[in-house]
Amino acid sequence: MKNRGFTLVELLAVIVVLGIVIALALPTAFDVFYKSRHKLDDYERSSIIDAGRLYITDLDEGNIDFFIPEDYEVNGHSYKKGDKISGYDLRVYLINTGGVRVDIKELVSRGYYDKECKYDIKPENCKVQGKCIVTAKIKGELVQDGRYWVSSAYEAEITEGCEL
């Protein structure tokens, strides 16, 4: 017997079966890819929020300087816009004003997020493009008969932008 290859009907049958298998598998593969992409986005969002928490923690502990964005009076001290405020006065200011809004570029420049990013040199290499604002807050409680604020938690949330 001589082997003369596949007949046209056999070849078409194999192509149809492969087409059906691919048609059934592709939506599942795309769904897995889509879900993994969202997981990555969720991871990046939580990393940005963690960067905001680190920033507010360092502010509260006096590790970085904070220059007040408005005139403010606290504990008998008057601060003018642009004055450096620190210590207990800063804690009271941040608790009473609901925290501070910080730009992603500030978080990146201080090393809290995306250490490979250089907005001033190659912004296209940065994970977050455009305007991204994180609001970082100190939660506090009054102690000693309501006379002294103590930090009880640091919180952050994305309040604007942050398209990944």
Image (cartoon, rainbow, N blue to C red):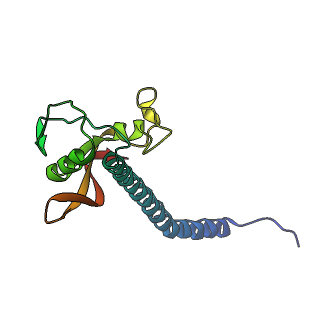
Q: Residue sitting at 14 percent across and 66 percent down?
A: 145
Q: Residue sitting at 81 percent across and 65 percent down?
A: 4
Foreground pick, 95 / 35: 95
Q: In which image quadrant can residue 81 be found?
A: top left
Residue 101 location (% of width, % of height): 24, 44
In the orientation shown, which residue stands out farthest toward the bottom?
A: 1
Foreground pick, 147 / 119: 147
Foreground pick, 108 / 127: 108
| Residue 40 is at least partly visible in this image | yes
**Direction from residue 31 to residue 77 in the image, left or right:** left
Q: In which image quadrant can residue 133 be found?
A: top left
Indicate whether 14 appears above or below 87: below
Residue 32 location (% of width, % of height): 48, 65
Residue 150 location (% of width, % of height): 25, 59
Indicate whether 74 appears above or below 69: below
Indicate whether 122 appears above or below 59: above
